[in-house]
Amino acid sequence: MENNIVRIEGLSHKYATKWAIRDINMVIGKTGIVGLLGSNGAGKSTTMNILCGALKQTEGNVYINGLNMKEDPARAKKEIGFLPQTPPLYMDLTVDEYLYYCAGLRLIPRSRMKSAVDEVKEQCGIAHFSKRLISNLSGGYRQRVGIAQAIVHRPKLVVLDEPTNGLDPNQIVQVRALIKEIAQERAVIFSSHVLTEVQLLCKEIKMIENGSIVFSDTIDAFNNYVEPHSLVLRLENPPAASVLEQIEGISKAEFLTERQVRLFFNGDQEVTERIVAASVQHGWKLRELNLDKSALDEIFKQLSNQS
């Protein structure tokens, strides 16, 4: 049995005549969170779809816990839980109905089905919504249900594609904590084009640009490219810049508009949690929190030119 949960060798795929990814190679250990980072259209989703067995590659091989996805897909897929960017939810089912359905799809024996569903409901914080229609849940709780279906069969690898996309800042913090808990006993691949999320969650980064791996190293090594560290906030009831600069980790605050402010920070991975907490405590009404887009584009450009 391999020491790594994922081994990808020479993975390439093309749609018609255009290569979406070319010669992807990577290994991923058995626990912890690995960030799969890249701009829109970089090849992240193609790589994940092949990794999860939803798409057959043109060239190369993917091994999941030593099993070749191309040669033994049924056994390999049993090791994987997948949450695509749009969660595969049935809105007219209750949480229980949906999770029991997913447990059946994952061939969990009837004798273990209730305990498996109860376990993931408790872990994902949705037990109190068991009888509620999924259509009546907030975006954050729908995402939790999506994560629950991905882990109901206790997979060794969980693949999450943009799991915090479209959530408000408080929901993002909650889902982030859930992902950290899940990763304590299995490997998690966290795909995003939002650098801030990857920095806050991941210890290791694999970055794809233009269909190729342009970076594969620790988050500390990646952070050497992120200068200056800046976040852009939109606040309905913003305080003075001097107040924002008192938040631990913030070095400078400058207002771009009446309600939009750029915060420069020192790379501390907990700074966004402090911003959200301060906003709730003081009634600043945080509406958006993003890494400065120009800084992210520059990182992509810099790394792509080195590949």
Image: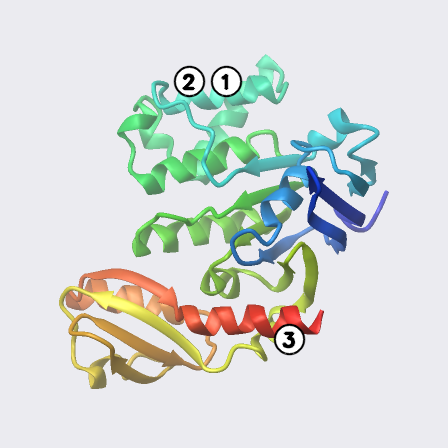
Circle 3 residues within 10 Å: few <14, some 14–19, many ≥20: few
Q: Nearer the viewer, residue 301 or 95?
A: 301
Circles 2 and 1, Cβ within 8 Å, touching? The answer is yes
Residue drawn at x 29%, y 64% as measured from the top left: 276
Cα separation, mark 2 vs mark 1, equals: 6 Å
Q: Closer to the camera: disc 1 or disc 3?
A: 3
Circle 2 residues within 10 Å: few <14, some 14–19, many ≥20: some
**On the image, numbered disc 1 is attached to which residue?**
101
Q: Who comes first in sequence, dot 1 or dot 3?
A: 1
Circles 3 and 2, Cβ within 8 Å, touching? The answer is no
Image mark for residue 201: none
Q: Quadrant of residue 159?
A: top right
Give the percent coordinates (x, y) of residue 192: 51, 54
**On the image, numbered disc 3 is attached to which residue?**
221
Cα separation, mark 1 vs mark 3, equals: 43 Å
**On the image, numbered disc 2 is attached to which residue?**
97
Q: Quadrant of residue 292?
A: bottom left
The quarter of the picture where the N terminus appears is top right
Residue 268 lies, with reference to residue 59, above or below; the image says below
Q: Quadrant of residue 293?
A: bottom left
Q: Nearer the viewer, residue 95 or 290?
A: 290
Q: Is residue 270 left or right of residue 112?
A: left
Most extreme residue toward the front is 17
